Image: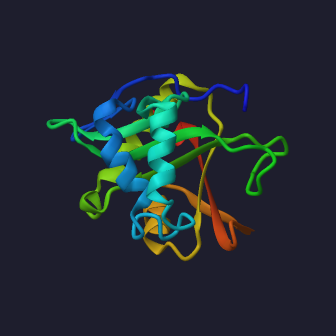
Amino acid sequence: MSRLPTLSATEITAERLLLRKARDADRDGLVELMTDPEVREHLGGPRPRGDVERFLDAAGTAAATAAPGGYVIADLVTDALLGTLALDRRAADRPGHVTGDGEELELSYVLRRAAWGSGLAYEAAIAALRAAAGELPDQPVLVVTQTANERSLRLAARLGFRPVATFEEFGAEQTLGVAGLSWFGG
């Protein structure tokens, strides 16, 4: 686990969204995110439902976003879980870095299928990156996605990430995108 700082805010509000920590009421939505074959198509496939439920029962639903920079993406009006977002540190021992020491900030997100196609991932990512730009010094931010995931690559480009490398991880080619944190300030 990195000792470098990441985003410390526990809630971030956007136009239609609230990024917040997980609650017990989010359990079913989290199970759906981790077991849906379409949602997990480019994330190594669905996890077995029983494994996910046992983990949430043992660790508690709050554990899903307990780390700094981990959030549920919730509808601002209904508070319903739409997905999850993390802005954390990419482990130095994993492939895909732009600095010699590794541990750059890495943005990741996943949405329930019902929330696809309405700009919510973009809105959540921009909100988190702007909050981080206001709190942390300028530094590289990474996005890593399977090269086959064209939708995710388009979103990364729309957010301002530029592809800089490809590499193999999890049995598939990954594309590494980078942006400067200061690009999201103000």
The residue at the point 54 percent across, 56 percent down is 161
In front here: 38 or 152? 38
Q: Position of residue 57 (x, y in %)?
A: 45, 36
Q: Position of residue 92 (x, y in %)?
A: 79, 44
Q: Is residue 7 left or right of residue 93?
A: left
The residue at the point 68 percent across, 66 percent down is 170
Quadrant of the snapshot with the N terminus: top right
In which quarter of the view is residue 128 placed?
top left
Image: 151 above or below 130: below
Q: Position of residue 182 (x, y in %)?
A: 55, 37
The residue at the point 28 percent across, 34 percent down is 25
Quadrant of the snapshot with the C terminus: top left
Colour scheme employed for the rendering of this structure: rainbow
Q: Is residue 99 left or right of residue 56?
A: right
State the count of labels: 0
Camera sees residue 184: no
- Toward the right, the furthest residue is 100
In front here: 144 or 30? 30
- Toward the bottom, the furthest residue is 148
In front here: 19 or 101? 19
Camera sees residue 103: yes
Q: Position of residue 102 (x, y in %)?
A: 78, 43
Image: 95 above or below 148: above
Image: 143 above or below 167: above
